[in-house]
Image (cartoon, rainbow, N blue to C red):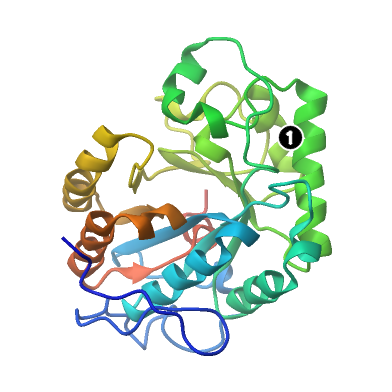
Amino acid sequence: MRPSRILTPRAAGAPTLPPSTLPPISVDSSSPLGAGSRSGLAHRRIAVSHRRIAVALHDIEPATFERCALIRDWLDDHGVDRVTLLVIPARDLHPLGERSPEMASWLAERRRAGDSIAQHGFQHEQLRRGAFSRQTLAHARSRRSAEFVGLDDEETRRAVNAGWRVLKLAGIEPDGFVAPAYAYTPALRAVLPEKFRWWAGLLRLHRALAAPDGDPDDDPRDDPRRLLTPAWGMGSDSLLRRTLSPSLIRAGSLLCGRTMRLDLHPSDLGHPRHMLALEWVLHRAGRREAITYDELIAQRGV
């Protein structure tokens, strides 16, 4: 089975997909998200009755830039005009601003258009094996990219700050942080409030007002800084996950509440069934308003 759309780059600028034949997600032009200037989007009022979709595009780096630009334009074709872009600052220890000025310019342009930028680790590779624990077990399927597992406090701080500086020098200072594989450690959670307004776990978004204690994704307490919004995404690291992911994400889109978080990866383009399922989900989203994590945190007031 092939996806219903052929992936072909445009002649100029960032590559993109041709327009979809499915109806786009409707955005009310009279709403704060559909009209006027997009500067200061995170501080606009959004009607609490609206259903929302928060899409995050993961693993953006020079090697995946073309695929990420394709996916971003494909989302635009489906009416998703605001996306949170998760950027890897130095995958091979070469700052992205030096290795790919074109990508840095594209990210700055996307921010001006309304997208939000998040730092996605530093290298996105686990360099040290961590001790076996409940936390590493929870992220066992993605240990290779669980970058901060096994690092001590000082190593964690250096990696986070180095990534932030790389993005800052490239002109794309990040709004928030998303750990690779959603693998957070106490040392990582302690340092995040120093640089970022928010950070995202697999199950929740967090406003970085102060360093939280414990594992937030497993903490059942009703902390007003936390917004319960599970992320739904595709799995491509095993045959079983590739087979089950399309059905699971369709089910997730039906079960989610007022806010739907959808994770996309550049590797999704290599799996036609994934793209068909994602297109189905976006079509099913109907009149949900596209919203970034930055806006979602500001609206929630957490």
- In the image, is residue 274 above or below residue 204? below
Q: Quadrant of residue 228?
A: top left
Residue 18 % position (x, y): 34, 83
**Vertical position of residue 125 compared to residue 118: above or below:** above
> Is residue 257 rendered to the left or right of residue 7?
left
Q: Position of residue 31 (x, y in %)?
A: 38, 81
Residue 210 visible in this rendered orientation of the protein: yes
Residue 265 in sight from this viewpoint: no
What residue sits 55% from the left and 59% below the top? Answer: 64
Q: Is residue 168 left or right of residue 47?
A: right
| Residue pointed to by mark 1 | 191
Q: Percent x, y for residue 276?
A: 22, 62
Name the quadrant containing residue 30.
Answer: bottom left
Measuring 82% from the left and 35% from the top, which residue is drawn there?
A: 158
- Name the residue: 81% across, 45% down: 162
54, 120: nearer the viewer: 120
